[in-house]
Amino acid sequence: MAGPKIHNPIDLGNDFGHIKFGHITPKYEYAGVLVRNGHPGQSSEHYMMFMSSGGMAGGTINRCPGVYQIHCGEDPVDDTALVINAARGDIVLKAPKGRIRLDAKMIDLKATGFNNQNGHINIESNEKITIKSKNIEVNADAVAKFLSSGTCEVVGSSAMNFYGGIIDCVDSATTLKPGKGTSTFSSQQQGGGFG
């Protein structure tokens, strides 16, 4: 069975690059426009494709073997120089062999959700998370928890201030022998600790 065919392609190019209207990929998908830097047989592909069929239909593919740079903002509008808007779906940034660095005068992270399943900001590391600043403030409207399956240390080299409308402290012995009086915190420990 013969593969797909473009009946009216337009292909213009030379040793430096070419542009093609109507291109078929090795996976037999159609690209309406292909812009390539260099000749087709070069070791490192450098191109841009506007896809017309397949799983990426309506998508744009950029392939760059060197540094991909976007420089803008000489004349920002309302202090905005670059906008990336994903109408639906996720935005994924990957650097499996490098770092992802954010460097700015100010950085804002905001998650807005409409129920308990949304509005979350998740930070996960398999080794270490380091936060360093002149001032650090954590403010929770409902609950603030600091949990560790190992050692949890709170150190104030100059001073340590604790305040609570009610302060309740328990240790691991509470799981075996309840203390005098009852409290929600004590009951949590007797039930196996925090979940």
Image (spheres, grey):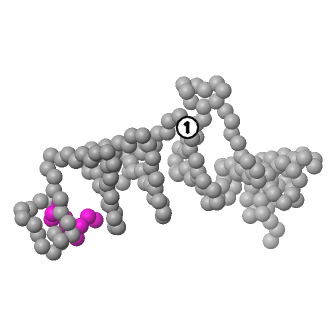
Magenta span includes 31: no
Where is residue 37 drawn, in percent x and y?
84, 48
The residue at 82%/49% (across/down) is 36
194 or 151, which is in the foreground?
Answer: 151
Figure quadrant of the N terminus: bottom right
Q: Is residue 39 visible in this depiction of the protein?
A: yes
Figure quadrant of the C terminus: bottom left
Where is residue 156 drawn, in percent x and y?
32, 49
Where is residue 192 drawn, in percent x and y?
22, 70
Where is residue 30 drawn, in percent x and y?
75, 55
159 or 64, which is in the foreground?
Answer: 159
> In the picture, residue 158 is in which quadrant?
top left
Q: Say which amino acid is labelled 1.
A: Ala
Left or right of 69? Residue 104 is left
Residue at image mark 1? 104
Q: Is residue 31 visible in this depiction of the protein?
A: no
Left or right of 186? Residue 158 is right
Residue extending farthest bottom: 176
78 or 56, which is in the foreground?
Answer: 78
The residue at 56%/30% (across/down) is 80
Residue extending farthest right: 14
The crowding category of the residue bearing disc 1, from other C-alpha atoms within 10 Å (few below 14, some 14 to 19, many at least 20), is: few
The residue at 28%/45% (across/down) is 159
Magenta stretch bounds: 185-195
